[in-house]
Image (tube, rainbow, N blue to C red):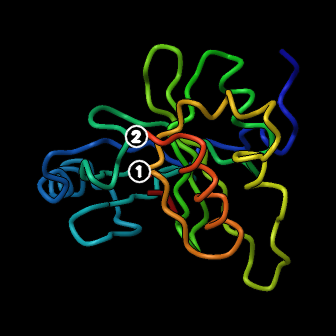
Amino acid sequence: MSAPSKAFAPTRLQNVYLVAEQPAALHAFYSEALGLSLKFADGERWYQYGVGGGNVSLACREEAAPATSGAVMVFEVADFDGAAERIAAAGGEVLGLRDMGAHGAVLSLRDPEGHVVQLFRRAPPANAAPMATEASSIHPEPSSVRPALSSVRPELVEGQGGAQADDATRLRQAQPERSKTE
């Protein structure tokens, strides 16, 4: 297997989050017992703390999908070029792409032992030109990549307009059967 492109290689550990049964109760624990300072909250679904230049978060099960328990590592990448092919070639499984609008996008995958891991790509600045190639590398049209997408679970894909909505449609068509960061 060849080395990943510079853009695909993680640039930093962006976040680690715990899937929590009761995120609000755990938020009280982590803020009071450990003194973590809240950076961002989405109701009682997601609590994010800044720790040493990175992020640690608590997520409800619905927000954490496809993970259902445990911790999830989120690696920040510049784009998703070649991600589906590399993940499949290394024995992993692409689970889906979640468009988070102005925040960016998350590609969820399962490693060969079944752990959920996510790749996070920030959204381009509002004044930047769209990155046409990045989403198409996840859901390319060439048949040579379709096998890499055979395990994508379309119900996990959320699209929000533009090219990413088209990519979400292609993901859904690729498999008829059946992630938050900053």
Residue shown at 49% from the left, 54% from the top: 157
Dot 2, how many residues are within 10 Å of its Cα: few (below 14), some (14-19), or many (20+)?
few
Return the residue nearer the eye: 116 or 156: 156
Residue shown at 32% from the left, 41% from the top: 18
Dot 1, how many residues are within 10 Å of its Cα: few (below 14), some (14-19), or many (20+)?
some
Q: CA–CA distance between discs 1 and 2?
A: 6 Å
Count of marks overlaid on the render: 2
Q: Which element type, helix, strand or loop, lies under badge 2?
A: loop
Q: Which element type, helix, strand or loop, lies under badge 1?
A: helix
Q: Amino acid at mark 1?
A: Glu
- Mark with earlier residue (1, 2): 1
Q: Is residue 7 left or right of residue 122?
A: right
Mark 1 near mark 2, Cβ–Cβ under 8 Å? yes
Return the residue nearer the eye: 124 or 131: 131
Residue shown at 28% from the left, 55% from the top: 35
Q: Is residue 27 left or right of residue 121?
A: left
Q: Is residue 62 left or right of residue 149?
A: left
The residue under label 1 is 155
Residue shown at 45% from the left, 42% from the top: 16
Write down the quadrant of residue 130 in the picture. bottom right
Residue 181 in the image: x percent, y percent?
49, 57
The residue under label 2 is 178
Return the residue nearer the eye: 92 or 24: 92
Residue 47 in the image: x percent, y percent?
31, 60
Residue 53 in the image: x percent, y percent?
57, 53
Image quadrant where one finds the N terminus: top right
Mark number, residue 126: none
Return the residue nearer the eye: 45 or 48: 45
Q: Amino acid at mark 2?
A: Arg
| 28 up-or-down from 153: above or below | below
Residue 145 in the image: x percent, y percent?
76, 33
